Image (tube, rainbow, N blue to C red):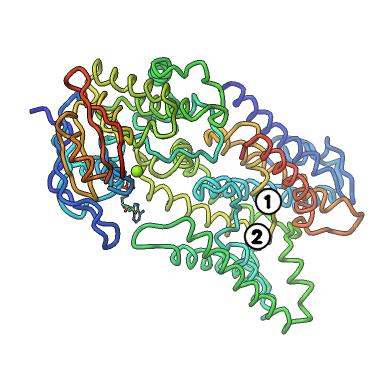
């Protein structure tokens, strides 16, 4: 079995409050997994546990059959790249310098970047279509472009697993589509696995191989979109009544009806 | 871009050495630059004939001016290095070398020494300096521990604890000043900063920590870049953030204590020099750290030269000069940075 991520019986508490409760997730190589759930349901907390930024109170998290806390920092960064939600930058960097930071796990102290580092950065900036901005300051580009910069940086880590926290929440519909299409391409041709939190149920249905539906820190359902996104599930988790349709007999899409 | 940065570092280095020479010629006694050069080369054990230079000039250059100029440059370099590091660790471009209470701690130690009336020193490092150093270190350690939660440190708590400690110590200093009217002048002068009375022993004592600190902090420059984009980001890039924070905080506060104990409180250097270079180069610490170090040395050297030459025969505390020039300049930068959204 090629499980790149294996979460077993995960429990997490902030102080004394139970935030994640008995989470079990297996993600296979090359899949696109979305985490859906209302605000405060624990999506970000789950991602931060998977990338070892937060330590679980109970349970185990394995990345490629090795427990996540057993990785050395740099070793983990070569396997798992994360685009966190909060990317407010108070300091001034060129976009190129920011993407180049993705090579940090491969670099030694005092050594400057190798030719290979620069090649990888260039390739990923072209793939994410930000090469034309390379000398601009991070303050001089739009939110959608900034999200691409952060993805380019994550890709420059050459990870097997890419974690994204609400990568499209602040973007217009075109940029939402383009970021998700980019992710889909990555999954298809690079054997990267992606776990991303999303708020747009319809886009999640359309792009995901699997969906995790979180409800107050528990997994309500974890399956293919058609099985997760039922009117009952959505009403019970979000408290919203919806009309549900199937596109091409397979992809559910919803229209909210009433609270 | 890389070569441009390199050229800039070379230019700063050349400027620093030229300014050291020029500043050595200036003072109540004007000494020609040719003689200054000769004396320096002679002291570096080169075979130079200085028999035609006045003995008093040789004494002034080697025992008074050069130590003072070099000490001022070193302290400028430290303050600027510490300022840049703190600004990164606190992710706050307004942090200066004294945020952890080094200044008020040092002032407290110095005031104590002056009030009790112990002054004479060991190795040219007076008891006043020593007490200032110990007290600055103690204050920083207290602030650090106040802000520690378990094994982690919260940078916001450090800033707050620093402010509280500073306010607390300032009141105690004021109280001690009330009870020691006779020594008021001495205390105030020390507090405002001066390199009067610099000597080679102080330089030796300061140089070693500076070099070690500089190398360690420079070794973190890539990690600092990742860090200022957020702790989560840095961790995802493989940075051991707790180790990095602790290392840089410990080294920086040690350096700040060294600087403030030999020179008194000199404001603005550690704030405006890093800012100036941020405006030029952005926040990439690989370049920002080395240019700030050199720029800080140059800035404080110029300010101290003004402090001892601007009024004939009267010495102005250098802290006053840095504030008079630094204040308006800083406001100008602030205005500009708001316009350009650059911090
Ligand atoms: N740093 C924190 N300290 C304490 N509680 C937190 C912290 N961060 C998040 N929480 C709590 O954890 C719960 C889940 O938060 P989060 O994972 O951010 O939700 P989501 O990303 O799904 O909106 C929320 O109830 C939130 O209040
Ligand atoms: Mg969230």
Residue at image mark 1: B71
Residue projecting furthest to the front: A258
Secondary structure of the residue carrying numbered label 1: helix
Q: Is residue A234 above or below residue A113?
A: below
Would you say the residues marked 1 and 2 are in contact, meaning their CB atoms lie under 8 Å apart? yes
Residue projecting furthest to the bottom: B179
The residue marked by circle 2 belongs to what chain? Answer: B
The earlier-in-sequence mark between 1 and 2 is: 1
Counting other residues with Cα less than 10 Å from the Cα at mark 1, is it few (<14), some (14-19), or many (20 or more)?
Answer: many
Task: Identify the image quadrant of the N terminus of chain B.
Answer: top right
* Residue B90 appears left or right of A218: right
Residue at image mark 2: B262
Label 1 and label 2: CA atoms lie apart by: 9 Å
Secondary structure of the residue carrying numbered label 2: helix
Question: Which is nearer the eye, A58 or B51?
Answer: A58
Dividing the image into four equal quarters, which quarter contains ligand 2?
Answer: top left
The residue marked by circle 1 belongs to what chain? Answer: B
Task: Identify the image quadrant of the C terminus of chain B.
Answer: top right
Q: Quadrant of residue B294?
A: top right
The percent position of residue A110, horizontal first and vertical second, equals 45, 33
Q: Is residue A121 above or below residue A201?
A: above
């Amino acid at each position: 079995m090629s499980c790149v991520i294996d979460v077993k019986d995960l429990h997490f508490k902030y102080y004394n409050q139970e935030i994640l409760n008995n989470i079990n997730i297996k993600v296979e190589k090359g899949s696109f997994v979305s985490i859906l759930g209302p605000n405060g349901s624990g999506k970000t907390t789950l991602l931060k546990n998977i990338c070892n930024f937060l330590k679980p109170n109970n349970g185990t998290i394995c990345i490629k059959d090795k427990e996540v806390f057993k990785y050395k920092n740099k070793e983990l960064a070569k396997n798992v790249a994360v685009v966190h939600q909060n990317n407010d930058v108070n300091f001034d960097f060129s976009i190129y310098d920011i993407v180049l930071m993705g090579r940090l796990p491969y670099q030694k102290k005092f050594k400057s970047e190798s030719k290979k580092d620069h090649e990888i950065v260039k390739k990923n900036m072209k793939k994410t279509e930000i090469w034309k901005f390379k000398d601009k300051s991070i303050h001089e580009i739009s939110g959608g472009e900034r999200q691409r910069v952060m993805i380019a940086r994550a890709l420059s880590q050459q990870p097997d697993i890419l974690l994204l926290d609400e990568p499209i929440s602040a973007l217009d519909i075109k940029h939402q589509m383009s970021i998700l299409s980019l992710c889909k391409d990555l999954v298809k041709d690079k054997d990267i696995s992606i776990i991303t939190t999303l708020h747009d149920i319809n886009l999640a249905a359309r792009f995901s191989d699997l969906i995790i539906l979180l409800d107050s820190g528990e997994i309500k359902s974890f399956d293919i979109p058609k099985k997760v996104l039922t009117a009952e599930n959505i009403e019970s988790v979000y408290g919203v009544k919806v009309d549900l349709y199937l596109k091409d007999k397979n992809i559910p899409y919803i229209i909210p009806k009433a609270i | 871009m890389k070569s441009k940065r390199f050229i800039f570092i070379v230019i700063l280095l050349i400027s620093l050495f030229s300014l050291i020479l020029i500043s050595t010629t200036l003072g109540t006694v004007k000494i020609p630059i040719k003689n200054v050069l000769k004396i320096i080369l002679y002291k570096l054990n080169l075979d130079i004939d200085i028999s035609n230079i006045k003995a008093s000039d040789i004494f002034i250059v080697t025992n008074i001016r050069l130590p003072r100029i070099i000490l001022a440059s070193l302290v400028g370099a430290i303050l600027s290095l510490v300022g840049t590091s703190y600004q990164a660790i606190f992710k706050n471009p307004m942090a200066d070398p004294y945020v952890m209470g080094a200044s008020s701690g040092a002032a407290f130690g110095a005031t104590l020494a002056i009030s009790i009336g112990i002054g004479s020193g060991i190795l040219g490092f007076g008891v006043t300096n020593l007490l200032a150093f110990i007290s600055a270190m103690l204050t920083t350690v207290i602030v650090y521990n106040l802000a520690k939660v378990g094994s982690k440190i919260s940078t916001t708590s450090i800033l707050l604890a620093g402010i509280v400690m500073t306010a607390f110590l300032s009141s105690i200093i004021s109280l001690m000043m009330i009870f020691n009217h006779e020594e008021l002048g001495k205390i105030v002068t020390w507090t405002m900063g001066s390199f009067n009375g610099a000597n080679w022993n102080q330089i030796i004592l300061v140089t070693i920590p500076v070099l070690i600190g500089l190398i360690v902090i420079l070794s973190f420059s890539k990690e600092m870049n990742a860090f200022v984009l957020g702790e989560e980001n840095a961790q995802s890039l493989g940075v051991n953030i707790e180790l990095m924070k602790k290392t840089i905080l410990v080294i920086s506060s040690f350096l700040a204590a060294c600087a403030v104990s030999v020179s008194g409180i000199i404001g603005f250097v550690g704030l405006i020099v890093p800012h100036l270079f941020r405006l030029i180069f952005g926040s990439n610490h690989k370049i920002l750290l080395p240019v700030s170090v050199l720029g800080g040395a140059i800035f404080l050297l110029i300010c101290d030269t003004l402090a001892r030459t601007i009024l004939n025969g009267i010495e102005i505390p250098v802290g006053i000069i840095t504030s008079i020039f630094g204040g308006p300049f800083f406001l100008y930068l602030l205005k500009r940075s708001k316009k350009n959204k650059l911090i």
